[in-house]
Amino acid sequence: MNNRAVGKVIGGIVLTILWILCFLYISSTLVIDFGGGFTLNFKLVAVIIGLLIIFFYHQFVPSHVEITKLSWTCVATVTWLSLIIFYPFKTDVNGGAIGFFTLLGGLAVCVLWVRFFADEISFETK
């Protein structure tokens, strides 16, 4: 694997951690007031812009297809782990449903990693 490939995977992980920090450290009470009674939640805007940045990063940074898949798998893993660690399952009203779908997400992350560990994947361009 070359340096560009490693850089794309590490860049995706760093962007994902920054995106998760938007969830953790931006207050839900902050709003963007456009006047005339039109307001937007600042946290929602930051999260959507962060998600778009992650998507376009993977779309436009050139690399092998398998490297992009590996980077997306790392993004899914970091997101899933942060949900497990930081979500207040017991104190939230929807904690049971979120817990169920978190378990399904964990199954999906495991299936993605099994694909990378079980197959003979070549990261070389042909």
Image: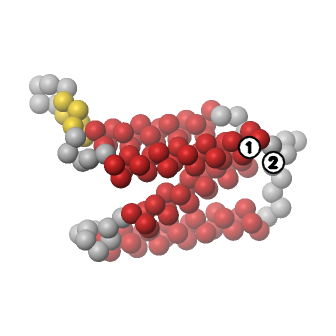
Q: Position of residue 52 (x, y in %)?
A: 47, 38
Q: Position of residue 89 (x, y in %)?
A: 32, 71
Q: Quadrant of the C terminus?
A: top right
- Amino acid type, residue under disc 1 in the picture: Ala
The residue indicated by pointer 1 is: 5
Q: Quadrant of residue 42?
A: top left
Label 2 neighbourhood size at 10 Å, few (<14), some (14-19), many (20+)? few
Q: Is residue 37 above or below residue 82?
A: above
Q: What scheme was used to colour the molecule?
A: secondary structure
Q: Residue at (40%, 73%) from the top-left corner?
A: 100
Q: Secondary structure at mark 1?
A: helix
Residue ranking furthest to the left: 36
Residue ranking furthest to the front: 25
- Residue 1 is marked as 2
Number of numbered callouts drawn: 2
Q: CB atoms at circles 1 and 2 under 8 Å apart?
A: yes
Label 1 neighbourhood size at 10 Å, few (<14), some (14-19), many (20+)? many
Q: Residue at (73%, 49%) from the top-left corner?
A: 66
- Amino acid type, residue under disc 2 in the picture: Met
Q: Residue at (56%, 66%) from the top-left corner?
A: 108
